[in-house]
Image (cartoon, rainbow, N blue to C red):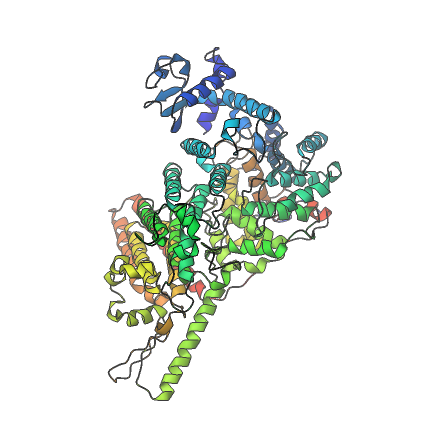
Amino acid sequence: MAAEARLANTPINSLDPTLTKEVLYERLVDILDRNNIDEVGFLPFLPDVSDCTSGSESGSPLQYPYSVQEQGTKLGISVFCWVPLLDESYRILKDSIRGGSIEEGQWWSNPEEGHLDPQKELQFLNVALTFPRNCKSSGAWHHRKWLLCFIHRDHETIPIPPSEIQEQLRICHLAAERYPKCYYAWTMRHWLVEQLGRYWWNASLQDEDSYHLVQDVQTLLPSAQLQQGLLHTTSTTEGPPLRDHFLQPLLEEFERMKSHMQRNVSDHSTQQHFQQCMIQLSGKWIVQRAQQDERHDPTRAGGSLTTVLQWTRNDLASRRQRRDKWFKEHRDKANQSGQIPTILYRSAIKSIAVFAKKINAIDDDEAWTIDSMDADGIQSASYSWVLSLWISELRRTHDLIMTYPGHESLWYHLRFVHYGLRWLDCEMDIGDQAAASCETDGRIVEDHDELFISPATMDKFLGQILSDLTSGQEDGETGNATSSLTEALEKQREYADRYLKWVHRLDMEADAC
Amino acid sequence: MSVLNNTNTALDASAPELLMDLHVKYIQELDTKKQDLEYWLTEHLRVNGLYWGATALHILGKPDALDHEKIVEYLVKCQHDNGGFGGHIDHDSHILSTLSAIQVLITYDRLDAINVDKVVDYVVSLQNEDGSFSGDSWGETDTRFIFCAMNCLSLLKRLDDKRLNLPKIIEYIVRCRNFDGGFGNSPGGESHAAQVYVCVGTLTILGALHHVDVEQLGSWLSERQLKCGGLNGRPEKMEDVCYSWWVLSSLSMLKRVHWIDGAKLTRFILDSQDSETGGIADRPGNMPDIFHTNFGIAGLSLLGYPGLVAIDPVYCMPRHVIQRIGLTDKH
């Protein structure tokens, strides 16, 4: 930016006296009116007149000093034009406001009267985003969200069409490619998946007694709205249930982020958004009931749900204590009663494994991948399906950490997955599986009080990390490792140490200030 | 009682010194570069720029380096009928510039120049039902704006306004807390050191710090320090001088400043100075700007750099000013 700023501070009329700020402004407006520009870039030089006439629809020499290419879709603006353009356009904007031609609160009401069209404004924002620096503007992203909420004024009760959300997700993805880690673009993206997730969420919260879904989203919507085709479906009896219109794009975003994360292992923002997708897909199993919005009304489509993760160490400890209390009570009862010996699991995850006859498959990666679960598991937002989501992610994160050593973001992501599994492992509300007992063949079987994930269960993974570090260190001493690999391994050790400390801290009671 | 730091931070003998006089000159000359691109691009930040400049000068011990009367006169022109201040003359009211204006006026002890009741009306009007605050009438929400509101009303001694719903504000901040102990700009937003500062600052002002997991958050903040000594705002981002403030002031409110290496951070900030023009950049070798100049100097003050005026970690204003207006120490 320093080099650009130095160039931009050079007065353009010292390079070409004919280029006054008025001339620059008028020519730019003319180009925007006569072409369909979808991308803007800056030129670190002043082009020749001859370069500015090629590639445009009109071929008019009045495009100079702008460059229009690709059949009038790409616009190059010389860096020398910036200051005079800012000067002139700002003057015109202030004059317009003072002249009252834009009335606050009535901007969108009537395009014919010279007011702004929200759809065109959205398209303009798409073009503005092609300039990387603009991706950082919180105002631009808020304006985008404001426009969407204006166009879909009733989005609290009638969902924004999934097709529109997918289009906006596409824009966010382009922004992520141009300017990674742009905080406001990712915040917008979270909001978009939340719009998809809220209907999925609402469905998963409907049944308080069982984890099976009992109602379709469509029953929550007045039939008149369906007839208006707001959800782009012609019939509620044909095709997949309406909730799939929200679940499918959510699953696509989840897969897209998984792939993006693989290609951007040091991008913490990507991983954080991926975590948001996991949260949205996990429904009621991940968010504390106490945090649900008190205005939640199951008859209201989409509801006013708080899909925010509210995990604290103290909450995790309370949850653990509740399940441990149940475990102790059942164990004591079983020991005293003289009944057929049972196996009790302190771990809710292991209980489900027993119930689903997966007891031999606790360590079997194949058994816990999402693809191995049947479609009903997904549709019903079942605890089992959510578990497979998280366990698959644990395995995948381990693999990424070992494949790409020294990336802090991956270790942070591991903390998130670890936390989630600890949370899920304390679940009580899984119906008959809470007892998770199964008859034995008469042998006395000891109770299993190991958790699914804990410092004790991390030995295999951390052992592999240590082994890699040791062989890396040996290569470094013999000169067989590059300095960048040595540095990566040093960081890997540091992050592994921090991770261990973090895991141990999880079990300590949190103190406030 | 001395307003200067009375602690000595351990300094690297080979570290450059703080070029105090050159930074004063840099700040004084800022408003003269009216044809520069950056001057244009930052017009909407003019009032914020005044706050950054005035605060930096006070911490450098040169409170009179800018013309107080001209500044007050300019700020009065930036106040609208609704009580809010715009970022510059003819710019719409916004809570960011409203806070900056109030901070400057209080620092110069010139609240008498404006209509304080109208400022309170404006700020209170921006509170939303869910406890968040909008930045302006167009509704953008961000935890930064909550902090601006609480900071502003606290400075004006108007936190007891009956129109405010303080429990709801605390509840909203708690919803922005993440599993890693950090805070984002909205519920579910990525933990970011600047958002941590505004959320911890809000909870400090409202006496609700018990909602913070100090060990978790303190550890997360201490992990922002990189090998070069500088601090970043999020994992795997580059170091930046402004995080010397956002991270350090948060650690200060949590009583954990000793969890980072102060000497290395001091060296990093000093290396980011521009020894020709004055001013401090985001990192060594880059162009300086008033934003990083202020927060670099503020960070050095928090670290106890000798010769600097002590700064308050909650309000980011000279500590003696906060004491003058009767606000108890919040950390």
Q: Using the image as rendered, state which of residue B164 and residue B322 is in the foreground.
A: B164
Above or below: residue A283 compared with residue A53: below
Camera-side residue of B249 and A165: A165
- Residue under the image location 40 percent in, 77 percent down: A327
Tally of marks: 0
Q: Quadrant of residue A471?
A: bottom left
Q: Position of residue B65 (x, y in %)?
A: 67, 32
Residue at image x 32%, y 59%?
A378
Where, quadrant-wise, is the C terminus of chain A in this rendering?
A: bottom right
Check the image and report above or below for A339 versus A495.
below
Q: Residue furthest top?
A: A17
Residue occupying image coordinates x 70% and y 41%: B118
Q: Position of residue B297 (x, y in %)?
A: 58, 40
Residue B238 makes an appearance in the image: no
Q: Residue at point 28% right, 56% down?
A: A470
Frontmost residue, B306 versus B62: B62
Picture coordinates of residue A1, whole percent (x, y): 45, 29
Q: Using the rendered image of the protein, determine whether residue B69 is visible from the camera's viewpoint.
A: yes
Residue B23 quadrant: top right
Res. A493 image quadrant: bottom left
